[in-house]
Amino acid sequence: MNPKDLNLNPGDYLPDEEINRLFSDFLEEGPTSTTGARPSSTPKSSKKRKKKSIVWDCFDLLMKTMPNGHQVEHACKITSFYNLNYTERRLFSKGDWYVANVFVKILTVFYEAIVELFGIYYLTYSLVLHKLYDMADLLRQYREQAWARPGTPRNMPHAQIGYGEGEAELIDDEHELISGGAMARSFLQAVATEEVATPLRVVQIEGLVILKIIKHCKEFSPALVTGQLLGLDVGSVLEVTNCFPFPIQEEDEEIEADGANYQLEMMRCLREVNVDNNTVGWYQSTMLGCFQTVELIETFMNYQENIRRCVCIIYDPSRSTQGALALKALKLSDSFMDLYRNNNFTGEKLREKNLSWVDIFEEIPIKVSNSALISAFMTELEPDTPVTQGDYDRLQLSSNPFLERNMEFLIECMDDLSMEQQKFQFYYRSQSRQQAQQQAWLQKRRDENKARKASGEEPLPEEDPANPIFKPIPEPPRLESFLITNRIANYCNQINGVTGQSFNRLYLTKALHDN
Amino acid sequence: MAVVSERTVLQFGPSSATAKVNPLVIFNICDCFVRRPDQAERVIGTLLGSVLPDGTVDIRNSYVVPHNEFSDQVALDIEYHHTMLKSHLKVNPQEAIVGWFSTGLGVTGGSALIHEFYSREVSNPVHLTVDTSFGSGEGTIKAYVSVNLSLGDRPLAAQFQEIPVDLRMIEAERVGFDIIKTTAVDKLPSDMEGMEMLMERLESLINDVYKYVDDVVEGRVAPDNCIGILISESVASLPKLSPPVFDKLINDNLQDQLLLVYLSSITRTQLSLAEKLNTAAQLP
């Protein structure tokens, strides 16, 4: 198809039928058809698409921001936003926006078709701005590659395309990008290479979120509660800017569906009032820090499937009576996730990866941020007092109940651990017994073979897979014992911390008395 | 003039005692204000909480409700308000609507309309205003209840009557103002760091008291009886124990703690040993 046929003027948009035509070309000619994004294809490929739903979600938002005729509405604002925030890279030009508009128009068709066909409407990833920026970056790369190619008829530097006369050429580019196989491949390659994630270093939490978490966890203590964290993923920092609580779960299917509805509804509502609509993890309360469970790992893996970076914030209301702010941000380590995903949690693999129980969870340092407005209010409302409630709590002399409970849990964990150890001992014992049996059998077979050789008969094979003694004994799972070890270590740390504090207090009392 | 009777006097309704405000509510309002839509001058929303038996309104939670304001008209997204309320009730059924908030200083014209709407949701709602513009040089937080002014049987107008606001800062104190007050904190204080800070503060307090007492004794400062009473009270609050009993108490406690530390260290050593054995254990 010749793009010149389209007769576009600046400010015009592709007519719908043209879009559809381009769209089908794109599917049939380019190697991109492997992504299986054809709306009218058989439901067989729907699974594939479900995984891709992340990609479509942002378009939902994108389209919502364009009420008037698919024009990216706040283009100027977004450009200036990026000028401010991404100074090290090249900025948007008007041409980029034009291309972005065309892209969006095409992808709208995709998205609508998919929503229509499969009803995927779940919003997980909404970093529209970041996506748009990535898009612009890719286009720039693509243009640079285009110059580098010898014999390219274009001599006009596209980086300086204005909104006016460069239009036709831009469309030219656009079309070639879509229909030309080689170019589409380079585009795809660029997409693939772009997905290198920087490691997560800091979790930045708003004071509002801390207060919300504390309120929720405390009100329902000692019941354990959870909630969802919303925020932004910016480079190596994960910003948690809002959160909302989940209702207490009950074991009922109907209520479970209700819970999912609640979550969607809440996110929709919060988005309407401009709260960051991007799940970055969840929070949960805990009692004395026994949070390292299989469920936590499973939940984490679930989240991780859908969002690139996720974090779990743990709050311990029972420790706040000690005056401590027991807030922790955790994530699973990458090496552990690899193992867990492939289900190779055996001793051999663990040795190979050199993974020990310390390496399952990674604690991420927490930073707290507040808006200037809140800071001003707090300074206004609360004059500097020398002693606060937290200080009183810290000076509480009686740490014994807390320690007692800690010890109780510790003893329980010890019991569990010894059970796990017994399982292992049993496993090793039966394994060595089996080996002895195998040896004996082999010996017998060899003797037999010798005898057969002497009498001129064919020797029997030295392996007999049908024999039950060759069946490998399944290794007991190690995950549980790892988790228990983690818990024990946690209790020990807590005991150490609390006793350290009470030493201080005791000496303080003593000094007071002596005076 | 014969018709003048006692009933034609302007009547005031009863006013509720005070409004207790959880700091979370202030935080939330500020956050909403920062995230308000481009054109909006102010944000309004619903306050959740409960009315305590003594008439105090306990405001524990809040959420913002989108609205549009034209010259003298206010359009509130009632549907949004109801979905949000339903969601909140699912989490915590104890928190019902107690009123509404708006940013800005004092009551404006549109307020009466919104207040009327909330009056239909709950009887005698509280109106909380938070001055986010710091127009008067300080962040004023005020609470109002509406009082119907009636002349005879005819309702004349609604009057917003200010009620005292009690900011309950205990929750915020627990978190630590050092964290909440500033715009950025790099690290949460750990147990020991918190203790250290506390000790420093305590020491400076005691030094202050010492200095004051010395100054009084040497006649540099006029003695204040109130402070004197407080000091003697705090000294007297130390329990009187005979030295052997006290020593025993302290030592017992110390021994217990030491034992625990010992135990936990030994457990940790054991764990690292066990881990080594576990992963290293291989069949011959």
Image (cartoon, rainbow, N blue to C red):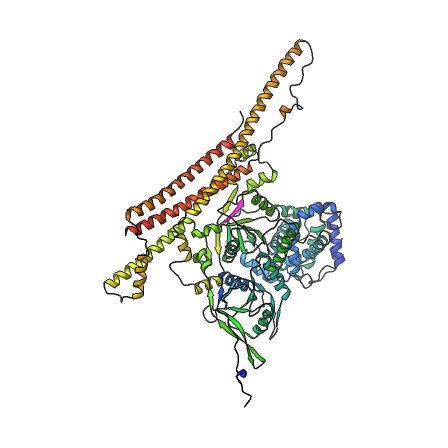
> Would you say A182 lies left or right of B105 here?
right
Counting from the top left corner in percent of width and height, residue A487 is at: 50, 42
Quadrant holding the N terminus of chain B: bottom right
Q: Residue furthest left?
A: B218
Counting from the top left corner in percent of width and height, residue A303 is at: 60, 48
Look at the picture and state if A478 lies above or below B63.
above
Q: Nearer the viewer, residue B145 or A438?
A: B145
Look at the picture and state if B250 lies above or below B279.
below
Look at the picture and state if A50 lies above or below A452.
below
Q: Which residues, given as a range, are shown in magenta?
A: A328-332
Q: Nearer the viewer, residue A404 or A208?
A: A404
Confirm whether the magenta stretch covers residue A126: no
Q: Nearer the viewer, residue A279 or A492?
A: A492
Counting from the top left corner in percent of width and height, residue A159 is at: 62, 55
In percent of the image, x 26 and y 66: which residue is there? B221
> Would you say A371 lies left or right of A47 here?
left
> Would you say B49 lies left or right of B185 here?
right
